[in-house]
Amino acid sequence: EADIYQTPRYLVIGTGKKITLECSQTMGHDKMYWYQQDPGMELHLIHYSYGVNSTEKGDLSSESTVSRIRTEHFPLTLESARPSHTSQYLCASSETGGGHWSQYFGPGTRLLVL
Amino acid sequence: KNEVEQSPQNLTAQEGEFITINCSYSVGISALHWLQQHPGGGIVSLFMLSSGKKKHGRLIATINIQEKHSSLHITASHPRDSAVYICPLNSGGSNYKLTFGKGTLLTVNP
């Protein structure tokens, strides 16, 4: 069973607040990802990481930032939340090396910015 | 035109029915995945395919690279199969970045 965790699961916060969404995995995966998903819509990659100290922006522009100081931890930060940031944020990880690997997804964080 | 198109967008079935969900794509791919997303938002990886067919329990996934088409079949469907099914692609030579479509919402009634 995949061991990838996200906290909080739900967050309601006011405009202008700084927030950090946590993501941790215990599988030792080098690759980690953040996706954003609006209701009824497809997932969009907003950040990914090959490993420690490696982060890249994804296909969808996002005002969020990420860091990867430890293999198991990939937090996402919004410095000043806005209503347009309201969405579901999903974290995932996959093994490294050649070939293709399934991605393991966390349960997601539903963010509502008032 | 989206790179990934799924059909149908919505599907309602009775318990026990055989279900087929289709995925067509317009780009070269190196692998195609089938994911299941439950109403709570959690996503489970069902299959990863680059050719042929895979089976796991009541689920069967097939892919035809020449026709750029994949299908997910569910035999003896059950209400717990109700979920959104998504078929993201590894395209453009990437073995990690996925391209997603909107998915197919399946509802299985008892």
Image (cartoon, coloured by chain):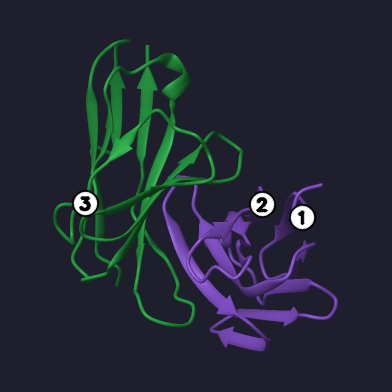
Chain colours: A green, B purple
Q: Residue at x 23, y 45 (%)?
A: A67
Residue type indicated by callout 2: Gly
- Quadrant in the picture for residue B16: bottom right
- What residue is pinned by disc 3? A68
Image coordinates of residue A52 in percent, x first then y, are: 21, 59
Q: Is residue A46 left or right of residue B7?
A: left
Instruction: Report the quarter where the C terminus of chain B lies.
Output: bottom right
Label number found at residue A63 = none
The residue sitting at the left extreme is: A70
- In this view, A52 is above or below B57: above
Looking at the picture, tell me which residue is in the foreground, B48 or A66: A66
Q: Residue at x 26, y 22 (%)?
A: A79
Question: Residue B78's x, y, as percent?
Answer: 59, 66
Q: Which residue is mark 1?
A: B5
> Element at badge 2?
loop
Query: Pointers 3 and 2 in contact (CB under 8 A)?
Result: no
Q: Given the image, on which type of amino acid does mark 3 rest?
A: Arg
Real-space Cα separation, disc 3 to disc 1, in angstroms: 34 Å
Same chain letter for marks 1 and 2: yes
Q: Which residue is mark 2?
A: B101
User: Is residue B100 visible from the viewing direction of this image?
Assistant: yes
Above or below A86: residue A89: below
Lower position in the chain sequence, tag 1 or tag 2: 1
Q: Percent from the top left, x then y, of residue B14?
A: 71, 60
Is mark 1 in CB contact (under 8 Å) with mark 2? yes
Taking the image as drawn, is residue B79 in sight? no
Q: CA distance from mark 3 to mark 2?
A: 28 Å
